[in-house]
Amino acid sequence: MTLQTPQPPPSALRAVLAALDSETALRQPAAAALRHPTGPLLPAHPLAVHVLEGPRADLAAARRTGWRFLIKDGTEVAAAAEVVQGAEGHTFSHFTAGPYLDSTLRALREAWQLTQSTRTRCQPRLLTFPGQYATALWLHSPDGGADLLIPLAPAPMGVTAHRAHPAAEVLPLLARTPVARPQAAPRPLLLGTTDGARLPSGAL
């Protein structure tokens, strides 16, 4: 299995770079580590984000919503930036911080090691389960092979993080019905706005 590094659309990369240069975007709490960098802030490790909601434990039901980039300050990952896909390209949504940053890097290393023993292709993606507050690295096989999931830590109860599972085995656990209603996802942030409302022309 060969790990194929995904190439994000140009509009997704432009949206992230604009956010890193935006005082409005950098006011988000999760962007605290980005406000006083020790070097250039660089987007790295882009992954297409797919969301699986509802009772169907079926990868075919996952919808692609955008891209997530890890933001590096020198050699360290300081945050992640997510962009959402729209009719006219991609728009910056939000920054994230916390344990998923290091967990994503670890899962990518594990995927790379796993794929060295075979020539079958696989494409890394992020698969999120809003109802379970869970995320997994999805190793998709475009050639029709079995897809694998590496749950990120922290994982839901009963799921082992950082272990490659056949998707058919772990999906029922990750996609099970939530006990509490999940919070709504943050709205995409229009750069040059305050709290999502467009500023009048010439206000900047």
Image (cartoon, grey):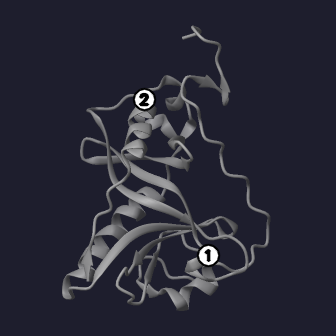
Mark 1, Cα crowd under 10 Å, few <14 / some 14-19 / many 20+, is: few
Q: Is residue 158 visible?
A: no
Identify the residue shown where x is 65% and y is 45%. 186
Find numbered disc 2 in the image and state the secondary structure of the residue it sits on: loop
Q: Which mark is residue 35?
A: 2
Q: Residue 192, image x and y in percent? A: 55, 23
Identify the residue shown where x is 68% and y is 81%. 56
Which image quadrant for residue 102?
bottom left
* Quarter in which the C terminus is drawn: top right
Q: Give the residue at mark 1.
A: 61
Identify the residue shown where x is 20% and y is 82%. 116
Closer to the camera in the image, 50 or 36:
50
Q: Residue 55, image x and y in percent? A: 73, 79
Rounded to the nearest angstrom, the CA distance separating label 2 from label 1 is: 38 Å
| Amino acid at the residue labelled 1 | Ala
Relative to residue 42, is residue 109 depicted above or below? below
Are discs 2 and 1 less than 8 Å apart at CB? no
Mark 2, Cα crowd under 10 Å, few <14 / some 14-19 / many 20+, is: few
Q: Which mark is residue 104?
A: none
